[in-house]
Image (tube, rainbow, N blue to C red):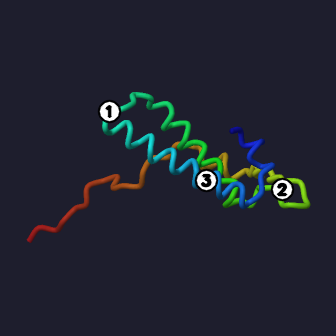
């Protein structure tokens, strides 16, 4: 299921779907281990689905019973003059000359 479709679900629906997908993932992993199936893509798809659901739950991006789903704000892009200075390649600080020791 796409993330856009998942945002239309309520918290309870997402939690129930999460438990279903985790069970399917366990079953899929078990089937792969015992050699019953060779479908590794199914496992990857289930892992991504679980991650999508957890992301929505952790960021509170789900529909409430009376509202539309919340929309996340895009991340702010930080631009400054100091970032240009840090991009320059500099030599690591080290000993430029061998230290001289006094001999007796």
Position of 3 relative to 11 (above/below)? above
Residue 11 image position (x, y, % from top left): 73, 60
Helix, strand or loop at disc 1? loop
In this rendering, the label closer to the viewer, 2 or 3: 3
Sort mark 1 into few (<14), some (14-19) or many (20+) by Cα contacts within 10 Å.
Answer: few
Q: First in sequence, mark 2 or 3: give its number.
A: 3
The circle drawn on residue 62 is none
Distance in Å between CA atoms under marks 1 and 2: 43 Å
Q: Mark 2 points at which residue?
A: 70
Q: Mark 3 points at which residue?
A: 18
Residue 94 image position (x, y, % from top left): 36, 55
Q: First in sequence, mark 1 or 2: give its number.
A: 1
In this rendering, the label closer to the viewer, 1 or 2: 1
Position of 22 relative to 35 (above/below)? below
In this view, the residue in front, 89 or 41, is: 41
Position of 39 relative to 58 (above/below)? above
Q: In this view, does 86 lie to the left or right of 14?
A: left
Residue 86 image position (x, y, % from top left): 60, 49
């Amino acid at each position: 299921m796409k993330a856009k479709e998942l945002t239309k679900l309520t918290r309870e629906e997402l939690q129930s779907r999460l438990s279903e997908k985790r069970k399917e993932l366990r079953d899929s992993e078990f089937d792969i281990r015992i050699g019953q199936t060779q479908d590794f893509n199914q496992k990857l798809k289930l892992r991504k689905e679980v991650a999508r659901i957890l992301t929505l739950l952790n960021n509170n991006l789900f529909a409430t019973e009376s509202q539309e789903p919340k929309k996340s704000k895009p991340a702010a892009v930080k631009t400054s003059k100091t970032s240009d200075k840090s991009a320059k390649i500099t030599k690591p600080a080290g000993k430029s000359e061998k230290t001289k020791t006094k001999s007796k």
